Amino acid sequence: MIRSIQDKALLNNGVEMPWLGLGVWKAKDGNEVIRAVQTAIAAGYRSIDTAAVYNNESGVGAAIRQCGVPREELFIATKLWNSNQGYTQTVQAFHESLQKLRLDYLDLYLIHWPVKETYKETWQAFLDLYEQGKIRAIGVSNFQDYHINELLSFSGIIPAVNQVELHPRLTQKPLLAFCKEKGIQVEAWSPLMRGQFLDHPVLMNLAKLHAKSVAQIILRWNLQNNVIVIPKSVTKQRIIENTGIFDFELSAEELSAIDSLHADHRLGADPNKY
Ligand SMILES: NC(=O)c1ccc[n+]([C@@H]2O[C@H](COP(=O)([O-])OP(=O)(O)OC[C@H]3O[C@@H](n4cnc5c(N)ncnc54)[C@H](OP(=O)(O)O)[C@@H]3O)[C@@H](O)[C@H]2O)c1
């Protein structure tokens, strides 16, 4: 049972990753992202999810340096962008990210999307960087079961994490079952559907019953499904609100009621078309 902001998921290589992190897509580099990360860390977050393509790794790095929490207590993840896939490009892009973040290691590095032609070579570079101790855990994002099976047949090394679009309109049950069987931790991106679904009557009713916000209900549903969440916000009150997910429990019926909102609806690109 996940009961505290300090609780962590145990990844398949023994590394622990917080169940709650701050997403920073669309947070502007400079003051906006620095303030968001600092607010989050002050509110108890220890995990930050950025990406090379978000163009805010420098701001995330600045916030980390100023936050007063020791580096080893933080969990910093970034992602390799598509145009930098391939062995040599990956190694170079990894070092550029590290430099922008001003870190000497990453906690988690993800292949952002499964670019068909290159993701195997990219994975080989990830494995080598991992072996060299520069990354504590390596994973993928937006990978379907067959992409992961291909990585496995090629390298035999299982990704620690698969970060995918996951929310009440896209519950990802088959992929969750596949990842569970393989020992891959699933992490939800756009867990709040970018705020577009917060007025659904089923969710509003549950929020009322638990005296919580709809955002908190959705995040808790994820935690009870063993899914890591990284809601994005640059608003202090929401960053704090999104931590209020450890002091209540949804019943099995309530979890099913949320599951039944699934409509196979994606906000982002379809990984099958990459
Ligand atoms: N791997 C990938 O391909 C991929 C793709 C997309 C996203 N991601 C990651 O996942 C993170 C989260 O996804 P996301 O940013 O797309 O969407 P999200 O977290 O579902 O939603 C973010 C939006 O919801 C608002 N919000 C946050 N908390 C709220 C609350 N308690 N009540 C009402 N509104 C709230 C935010 O507004 P304010 O900021 O204005 O407060 C923002 O507009 C990203 O930041 C990124 O780190 C990864």
Image (tube, grey):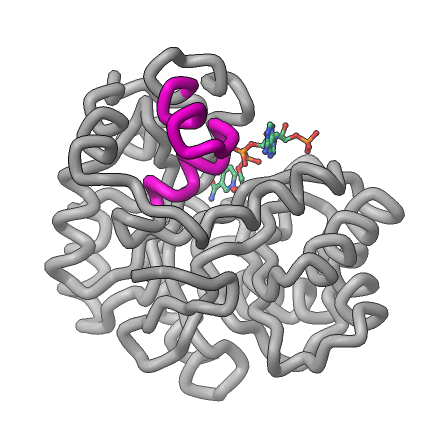
Q: Which residues are magenta?
A: 204-222
Q: Point out residue 62 in the picture as x, y percentages from the top left corner.
A: 83, 63
Q: Quadrant of residue 257?
A: top left
Q: Main secondary structure of the magenta part?
A: helix
Q: Could you tell whether 248 is left or right of 154 in the image?
A: right
User: Is 65 rendered above or below residue 203?
Assistant: below
The quarter of the rendering in which ligand 1 is drawn is top right
The residue shown at (13%, 48%) is 177
| Quarter of the rendering occupied by the C terminus | top left
Q: Quadrant of residue 12?
A: bottom left
Q: Point out residue 224 in the picture as x, y percentages from the top left corner.
A: 29, 49
Q: Could you tell whether 58 is left or right of 179 in the image?
A: right
Depth check: give the residue in front, 158 or 156. 158
Depth check: give the residue in front, 135 or 19. 19
Depth check: give the residue in front, 174 or 16. 16
User: Is 178 rendered above or below residue 216?
Assistant: below
Q: Point out residue 205 in the picture as x, y percentages from the top left corner.
A: 38, 19
Q: Point out residue 93 in the picture as x, y percentages from the top left corner.
A: 61, 62
| Quarter of the rendering occupied by the N terminus | bottom left
- Most distant residue in the right direction: 31
The residue shown at (61%, 60%) is 45
Q: Could you tell whether 4 is left or right of 262 in the image?
A: right
Q: Is residue 221 magenta?
A: yes
Q: Is residue 7 magenta?
A: no
The residue shown at (36%, 60%) is 2
Report if residue 255 is visible in the image: yes
User: Is 45 rendered above or below residue 82?
Assistant: below
